[in-house]
């Protein structure tokens, strides 16, 4: 497996999606603002997406990929009968469960909103919030089916189609907002929110059909049959339940965040959602891409009892992840307000909203390297079919997160909630590494440790430059489009030159390792 190439494909497609996502959120901030309708929309959009990332993309993929690879190994070269049979068995059980769960959640939605909304005391338990949430929730079932197709394609190292699928969601949502502007100039936020809600469910259908087409093109034929809990399906179920905690710590934290957000001032849902868009850019491009790319490789090395190969894949992933994530975190922390102003300021989104969102960004990115490291470390457990150990680390991390929320939110508001999640992610990262190290399954070697130190040194210098230069662009960050783009490019460009220049000079970038990463790593 060519780790850099695979990560580049996934990261490149994710970058396209994030660019469309930025365009989407820039329109959202101006049309809905940090208002009651804005909060209602963010809540409606987050509910199915949290469940999707937690159960489908997180737990399902982590459990399905190793089992699918085992079936593919049974098939041998040029055949996919066992893998296809397993996929159809899973799909036939998966769909009824999704239908029942979605119908139940839609029926109970008034009580779900009431529970999140401080038991109805937060001002968000109303017909608009409930209607928006009911319209968007079918997206969960549609996108979960798509996830099965995506897991199959990822397992055979065809990453591009699945990585491109989120772009389709953003295109549908942008189209909905353009329609709203054509209808009434976007003057009615409730109409805009309703169009957005319907666009999400339409996007689910489009994404599902997109991945179905590419899976068929890869040679897989899907058919529904009577649901049966075969031994393979039962094994998958046993793996999924603990993987919900192990793979989905970030999403579980986000779900808990909803309950705390429902008890904060109006606009808190919007502040966190827009801040997380900036945080998700490097997390999606680097962390999710690396995690997706290394799981199949680790599974193959471990199946061949090649401990050295498994160690090499995770070491390379950590080095590549930190090389890109640490400067991203430092840069976002130092340039939070310029970035938020440049992307979101305007329309119904004022300067007070910019300041509130920037404070959340600064706290979120404290945990950015940890989120990426968790994405790299957890496949070390899942590839060995150990989904139980991450449950324990996740449980401890969640406990820390809740305790920190209770301590920090009264002092810092929504920014305290962001910082609590970041610190909890570092705790989870430390526990995962310690367990792998003690088991002799992965160790950060001295050479990697020295390189991490050089990365930190280069990123610190970059942060100092950004911090010094940022005030000089204050009059440009909220001005016209050209002024915003040029000022942000100048600020980010200066930081990038300093970081990568120092990283190259100090040896934080290992030229030999870069050459090795571009060669095929998996032995025949």
Image (cartoon, grey):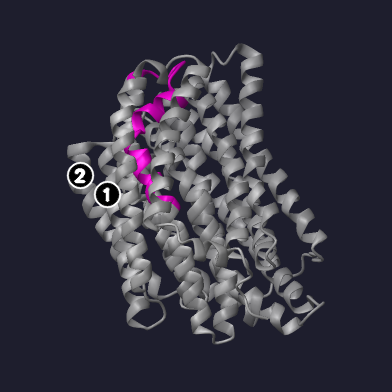
Q: For the stretch drawn in magenta, what is the main secondary structure?
A: helix
* The residue stretch that appears in magenta: 324-351
In the rendering, at what x and y percent does residue 286 appear?
A: 50, 53
Residue 108 shows up from this direction: no
The answer to whether 263 is drawn above or below residue 163 in the figure is above
Instruction: Look at mark 1 in the image and give the residue it sits on.
Output: 420
Q: Nearer the viewer, residue 498 or 344?
A: 498
Q: From the viewer's perspective, is 501 left or right of 92?
A: left
Q: Are marks 1 and 2 in contact (CB under 8 Å)?
A: yes
Q: From the viewer's perspective, is 214 left or right of 11?
A: right
Instruction: Give me the disc on residue 101.
Output: none
Instruction: Residue at 51% x, 54% y: name it.
Output: 53
In the rendering, at what x and y percent does residue 94 appear?
A: 64, 63
**Residue 347 lies in the magenta stretch:** yes
**First along the sequence among labels 1 and 2:** 2
Figure quadrant of residue 465? top left
In the rendering, at what x and y percent does residue 136 appear?
A: 58, 40
Q: Please rate how many residues cluster around mark 1, counting C-alpha atoms within 10 Å: few if below 14, some from 14 to 19, many from 20.
A: many
Q: CA distance from mark 1 to mark 2?
A: 7 Å
The answer to whether 359 is drawn above or below residue 46 in the figure is above
């Amino acid at each position: 497996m060519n780790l850099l190439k695979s990560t580049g494909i996934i990261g490149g497609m994710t970058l396209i999606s994030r660019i469309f996502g930025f365009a989407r959120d820039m329109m959202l901030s101006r049309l809905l603002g940090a208002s009651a309708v804005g909060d209602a929309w963010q809540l409606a959009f987050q509910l199915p997406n949290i469940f999707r990332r937690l159960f489908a993309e997180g737990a399902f993929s982590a459990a399905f990929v190793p089992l699918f690879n085992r079936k593919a190994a049974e098939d041998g070269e040029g055949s996919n009968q066992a893998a296809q049979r397993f996929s159809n068995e899973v799909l036939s059980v998966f769909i009824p469960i999704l239908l029942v769960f979605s119908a139940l959640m839609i029926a109970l939605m008034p009580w779900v909103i009431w529970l999140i909304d401080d038991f109805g005391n937060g001002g968000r338990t109303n017909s608009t919030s409930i209607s928006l949430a009911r319209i968007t929730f079918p997206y969960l079932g549609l996108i979960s089916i798509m996830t099965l197709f995506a897991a199959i394609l990822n397992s055979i190292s065809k990453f591009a189609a699945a990585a491109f699928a989120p772009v389709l969601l953003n295109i549908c949502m942008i189209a909905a907002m353009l329609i709203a502007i054509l209808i009434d100039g976007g003057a009615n936020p409730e109409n805009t929110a309703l169009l957005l809600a319907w666009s999400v469910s339409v996007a689910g259908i489009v994404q599902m059909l997109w991945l179905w087409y590419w899976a068929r093109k890869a040679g897989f034929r899907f058919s529904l049959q009577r649901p049966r809990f075969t031994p393979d399906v039962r094994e998958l179920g046993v793996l999924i339940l603990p993987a919900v905690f192990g793979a989905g710590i970030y999403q579980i934290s986000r779900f808990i965040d909803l309950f705390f957000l429902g008890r904060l001032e109006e606009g808190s849902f919007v502040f966190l959602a827009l801040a997380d868009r900036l945080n998700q850019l490097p997390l999606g491009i680097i962390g999710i891409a690396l995690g997706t790319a290394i799981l199949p490789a680790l599974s193959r090395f471990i199946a061949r009892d090649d401990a050295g190969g498994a160690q090499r894949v995770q070491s390379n992933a950590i080095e590549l992840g930190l090389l890109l994530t640490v400067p991203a975190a430092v840069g976002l922390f130092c340039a939070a307000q310029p970035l938020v102003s440049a992307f979101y300021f305007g329309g119904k989104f004022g300067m007070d909203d910019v300041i509130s969102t920037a404070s959340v960004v600064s706290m979120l990115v404290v945990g950015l390297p940890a989120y990426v490291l968790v994405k790299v470390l957890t496949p070390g457990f899942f590839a060995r079919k150990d989904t139980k150990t991450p449950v324990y680390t996740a449980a401890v991390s969640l406990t820390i997160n809740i305790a920190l929320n209770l301590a920090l939110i009264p002092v810092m508001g929504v920014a305290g909630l962001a910082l609590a999640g970041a610190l909890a992610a570092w705790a989870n990262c430390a526990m995962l590494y310690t367990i792998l190290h003690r088991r002799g399954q992965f160790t950060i070697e001295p050479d990697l440790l020295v390189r991490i130190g050089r990365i930190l040194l280069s990123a610190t210098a970059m942060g100092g430059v950004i911090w010094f230069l940022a005030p000089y662009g204050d009059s440009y960050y909220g001005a016209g489009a050209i002024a915003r783009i040029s000022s942000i490019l100048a600020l980010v460009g200066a930081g990038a030159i300093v970081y990568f220049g120092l990283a190259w000079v100090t040896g934080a970038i290992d030229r030999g390792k870069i050459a090795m990463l571009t060669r095929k790593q998996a032995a025949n």
